[in-house]
Amino acid sequence: MALQSPTYWLAEHPSMVNFRSSPTQSWGSTWSFLFTAISAYIVAATTLYTLLILSRWRRPFLAIHSLAVALISAVVFVGMLLSAEAEIRETRWFWSRTKTSTPFQWLLCFPVGTRPSGRVFFWSYVLYLSCFLHLLRTFFTILRRRKLTFFTLFNQSDKSILIFMSFLWLEFSQSFQVQAILLTTLLYSVVYGYRFWTAIGLPRARFLPFVVNCQAVLLGCNLVCHFGVLFLHLLKGGCNGIGAWGFNSVLNGAVLLLFLKFYAKKMHSRNTKVSEDEDSTHWGSVNLKEKHT
């Protein structure tokens, strides 16, 4: 049997085309599972920290985790990109019955009545499940004997927020999820690729500012697209899952605030270091002149 093309496995496979998200058919797609999983994560992390004895896990665990998350994110990004293109190609004929006129409008605003089935929602479901893999980083942090705080639990944590958001994307067939998934997986593939790079001992090469700036740009694009969804919802008379979109906007706002706090702290520490380096250079030159005189 000839090998199928990547497009077939990422966008044309029957499991994706015929996918339908439902509490009875999709593992983990119930409210009870969502709250139980998050609660179990917090309890397990706290318990592990409390019961931790003299033991050490080394960086290879972080490297493997980072590589796995980066690869999964990259696959979801490519799969969603191909699937969105296929859905647009196959459903354009139906747009004449709605006020949707361009692919960009469809990406921002699903027509009212959209069901969680098909390729796009398959990859949305894969992202939802992969989010639980991100939580393992908290346990690696604990095992490296770092202090566990609420901020660590919640900031590992835009992960927990992303789990809530991705669940709502499926539960309510929410508009705007295609761009959100593309931006999120692109960001995670870059960030965790960088973490893998540093975890295996390769030089940092001043790549961290690039990663942080990428996150800032993507969050900015995400904010602009949110205004686009609201505009189309008012203009077209409704976007599917707008209630879930409103709640997700609040969660996105929380992620944005956490990032801005982190970004401001990084910029402040960077500027402080530059100032200290300039001062040390200045006083070093002064001392050198005094020595010669």
Image (spheres, helix red, strand yellow):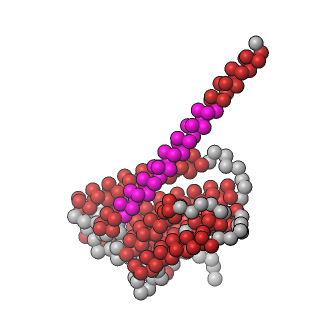
Prevailing SS of the magenta stretch: helix
For this view, does 136 lie left or right of residue 64? Answer: left
When asked about the image quadrant of residue 57, the answer is bottom right
For this view, does 30 lie left or right of residue 227? Answer: right
For this view, does 22 lie left or right of residue 191? Answer: left
Could you say where residue 6 lies in the image, as x and y percent from the top left? 57, 70
Name the quarter where the N terminus is drawn.
bottom right
Could you say where residue 143 lies in the image, as x and y percent from the top left? 65, 66
Nearer to us in this view, 154 or 133: 154
Q: How many marks are shown on the rendered structure?
A: 0
Residue at x 72% of width, y 53% of height: 202
Which residue appears farthest toward the top when viewing the image?
293
**Is residue 87 in view from this perspective?**
no
Name the quarter where the C terminus is drawn.
top right
Which residue appears farthest toward the bottom when viewing the image?
24
Could you say where residue 110 lies in the image, as x and y percent from the top left? 33, 67
Could you say where residue 252 lies in the image, as x and y percent from the top left? 40, 59
Residue at x 25% of width, y 66% of height: 238
Nearer to us in this view, 12 or 54: 54
Nearer to us in this view, 288 or 59: 288
185 in magenta: no
Decide: is 223 above or below 32. Answer: above
Residue at x 69% of width, y 20% of height: 286
When asked about the image quadrant of residue 111, the answer is bottom left
Magenta segment, which residues? Answer: 248-277
Residue at x 34% of width, y 65% of height: 247
**Is residue 250 in view from this perspective?**
yes
Decide: is 244 above or below 282. Answer: below
